[in-house]
Every structure is written in structure tokens, then in C-alpha cells.
Image: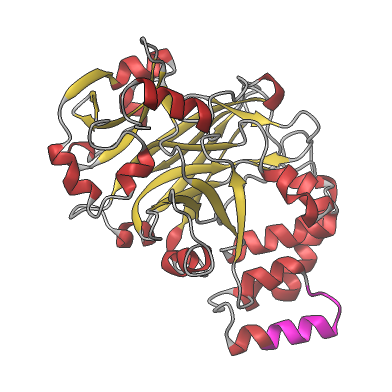
Amino acid sequence: MNIADILPPDHTSARLVGRVWVDDGHPGPRTVTLSGEELLDISTLAPTMSDLLALERPAQALADAGDQRICSLQEALDMGALLAPPDLQAIKACGVTFAASLIERVIEERARGNPEQMEEHRIELERRIGGSLAGLQPGSDAASRLKESMIEDGSWSQYLEVGIGPDAEVFTKAQPMSAVGCGAGIGLHPRSEWSVSEPEVVLAVSPGGRAVGASLGNDFTLRDFEGRSALLLGHAKDYNASCAIGPFIRLFDEHFTMEDVRQAEVKLRVRGADGFEEEGTNRMTEISRDPEQLLDAAAGRLHQYPDGMMLFLGTMFVPRRDRSGSGSGFTHLPGDRVSVSSPRLGTLINKVIYSDQAPPWTFGIRALASSLAARGFLQA
């Protein structure tokens, strides 16, 4: 993997921050910013990413961050040292935020986790509501009328409730520090027979609940698990190496704002070792709820995150092209190369592996605290 594979075309004017593993006398992650092709240590400004995003103006603060070089970005990629950018932040996600994903979730539910039944349910569902969802504002009077009519004919769904009802779905995608970064393996649950990548924009949120930047994410999910029961959402979403974020967080500044998030197009590309190829695009202009609305639903007076939060915004595209015969649908296989890309955010690349074969997650908050203390960043 080369740096040209992952950086946004305008990276020289972007404020890109992340984390890199340093294996020196005090092994652990370092917060870094990208300058040209070099990774510079910004630990004296912000020893954790949570500290950086808590600053009033993090992009502007980088000007006083120092210039101690750790390594080049290419060296970090070659060593597998580029980590997921967040550390102490909660990792949350919004689901069913696009009409297309809403339909797919209802299909999962009705197929009961069986991919071979999904096409007949898709045809039935699109005949019933397909056109009715275009431009439908969640929580509106029109949405309420559609809900009432579908309850009357027995076709209402819990996914329709969060897709067009007044309350957005917000769930815990992964634990703090558990996400994998660009170049790492992403986990395929060994018992799943229907798994997909979900390409998404991920907001970087300050402890005060303010969006201060964005990254790319792969909300890897097990459609068969969640399709069997929505109560298996935790199993379907949160397991070893099931969440990838990166390659960097791009901080908001005069060159990159929330409006760029609203206009973003996020492409998913899958290349299998078996020669299978699939790609599609997640267009943020088609989202049902504005990113700021989703942020308000996730954080505020009722939900505080003192270490900040990373918030997945959902997707309108998941792979579904038949992979092993007519009607089989799509599922990931070990060896798939998955890329999630957007021009202003770069490209997040991961290789699919079985989750029980991914490196164990052992460096958590206690280990980070010990590392910071050894480097003189924590005082008793």
C-alpha cells in the first residue's frame, strides 16, 4: 500500500490528524499530524486524540504543535503502525438513515437472516413502499400517515419506525480504542454466512458535543445475525476487528466544513481473491436526516460523552450482487480487499480476515494510561 492510495488529493491543504504506534522505550500510540509525507508528533499539544478534539479550535492549534518527526507515512504503512485515529472516544453509529438502507434492513428482518429469500422480499417491499419513501421527512405528518396505513395492513416494521419515525436509531458500534486502522484486517465472524461492509462518513465529536472533523468508516455488519433478531444487534456489530476508521481525521477549517460532509460521496469497492468485484456509492445528499440532526440525537443534555465521540452517519449502499450463484446474494469471504473512499477524506483500506484470527485487542485504556504516565503526561 502506497501513501497515494490513501491520501485525499488536496492533502497538502488538509489538517489531517491520527495515531501511530511507536515501539520504543515506552511502547504505545502517539498522536500525529501529517506534514507533507511526514508524521509529526503532537503529543505535547494533545497526548490523546480526545485531548486534541476537546480544544476550542483544534485545526488552528496544530500551528503550535511542534515538529518532532516520528516517521514517514510510508514507513508507518509498511510497518502496519497506522492506527485508527480515535482513542478514548465512544464509537457510536446511526442506522437506517437512508431510504435504500431502510429497505435493506426490512428485507433482513423479513428474510430472517436467510440471504436466499431476500430478493422475493425486496420485490414485495419495493412494490409496497418503494416510491413512498423518496423525500419523506422522518417524523413528518406524511411519515405518520404512511406508518398508520402500514400498521393497519400488518406491514409495519421496527426498522421503518427508526427510518421514518421521530426518533433516530443510535447504537454502540464498538468500544473505545477497539477500532482498527487503515491497512489492518477487518473481522468476518466465523459463524456468519451473510456479512457486508457499510461505507460511511464518521463525525469526530468534541466532549461538548460539537463536530470538529470527519473520517471514513467501515461499519462491518452481519446481516444474518441482525436479520434473525434485532436483539442480536450487539453480536452483529460489535466483535473483534468489526470496526475500521481512518486513515485520518480531517479537522474542520476554512478548507473543509460540515457542508463538505453533507455533499460527500463515499465509494465502497470490494475485490475478492476469487476474482469477484463489486462497488457502489453512498451519496450523503440523499440522507434522510441531516448530520447535525443525527448528532443532536446522539449527544446533548441527555447523552454526555466527556471523552468525545466518533459517530457513524449510516449508508445507502451495501453490496448485494450474487456471489455464488443466482439468488445467493453477497457475503464477504476471507481475503477480500475492501476500500472506502471519498475525495476529501482519502481512502480506508482493509483486508477481510476471520475475527478470531485478528490480532487480539489487548492495549486498552489502562495500558494507554500507563504509557502516558511513563512518558510524563499524567501527574498523580
Residue at 76% of width from left, 33% of height from top? 324
Residue 124 occupies quadrant: bottom right
- Residue 313 place in picture, x, y as percent: 50, 56
Please tell me which residue lies in front, 319 or 34.
34
The verdict on residue 151 being magenta is yes
Residue at 38% of width from left, 62% of height from top? 262
Main SS category, magenta section: helix
- Residue 248 place in picture, x, y as percent: 36, 37
Residue at 41% of width from left, 13% of height from top? 79
Name the quadrant of the C terminus: top left
- Residue 73 place in picture, x, y as percent: 30, 22
The verdict on residue 272 being magenta is no
Please tell me which residue lies in front, 236 or 23.
23
The residues colored magenta run: 145-156
- Residue 350 place in picture, x, y as percent: 52, 28
- Colour mode of the rendering: secondary structure
Q: Is residue 344 visible?
A: no
